[in-house]
Image (tube, helix red, strand yellow):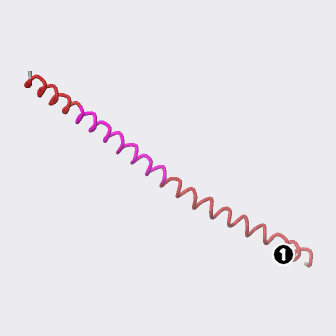
Amino acid sequence: MKLFTDLMISAFPIIILAGFWWYFMRRFRGTQAKQLDYMAQVKTYLTEHLAETRRLNDSLERIATALEKKDH
């Protein structure tokens, strides 16, 4: 019985460390999934913003061309 008690006492810190490690790994996995979702939203926003900026630039170019023709 003393051997079992000694074994449990010596293994207790390792079990506690393994528990902390397991807890933080699961917590990190959830955080990482949230970050990936956020990055996907940012990518979508930037893609839409770039398309809108190109559309605006095309419109401004047409306006500038029309104004140049009007001046001549």
Question: Does the stretch in magenta take in 70?
Answer: no
Residue at 87% x, 71% y is: 7
Camera-side residue of 42 and 29: 42
Residue that extends furthest to the front in the rendered view of this protein:
72
Where are the magenta residues, as a range?
Answer: 35-57
Instruction: Give how far across and how far down residue 4 sits, in percent.
Output: 88, 74
Picture quarter with the N terminus: bottom right
In the picture, residue 15 is in which quadrant? bottom right
Camera-side residue of 66 and 5: 66
Residue at 85% x, 72% y is: 10
> Is 22 located above or below residue 40 in the figure?
below
Q: Is residue 10 left or right of residue 71?
A: right
Q: Is residue 27 left or right of residue 6?
A: left
Residue at 42% x, 46% y is: 40
Q: Is residue 3 left or right of residue 44?
A: right
SS category of the residue bearing label 1: helix
Q: Identify which amino acid the numbered label 1 is placed on.
A: Ile
> Is 55 located above or below residue 26 in the figure?
above
In the picture, residue 67 is in which quadrant? top left
Picture quarter with the C terminus: top left
Question: Does the stretch in magenta take in 45?
Answer: yes
Instruction: Give how far across and how far down residue 13 sits, in percent.
Output: 78, 71
Camera-side residue of 18 and 60: 60
Q: Residues within 10 Å of mark 1 (few under 14, many from 20)?
A: few
Instruction: Give how far across and how far down residue 71 sits, in percent.
Output: 8, 25
In the picture, residue 26 is in which quadrant? bottom right
Q: Is residue 54 left or right of residue 31?
A: left
> Is 27 located above or below residue 35 in the figure?
below
Dominant SS in magenta = helix
Instruction: Give how far across and how far down residue 41 sits, in percent.
Output: 39, 48
Q: Which residue is mark 1?
A: 9
Residue at 19% x, 33% y is: 60
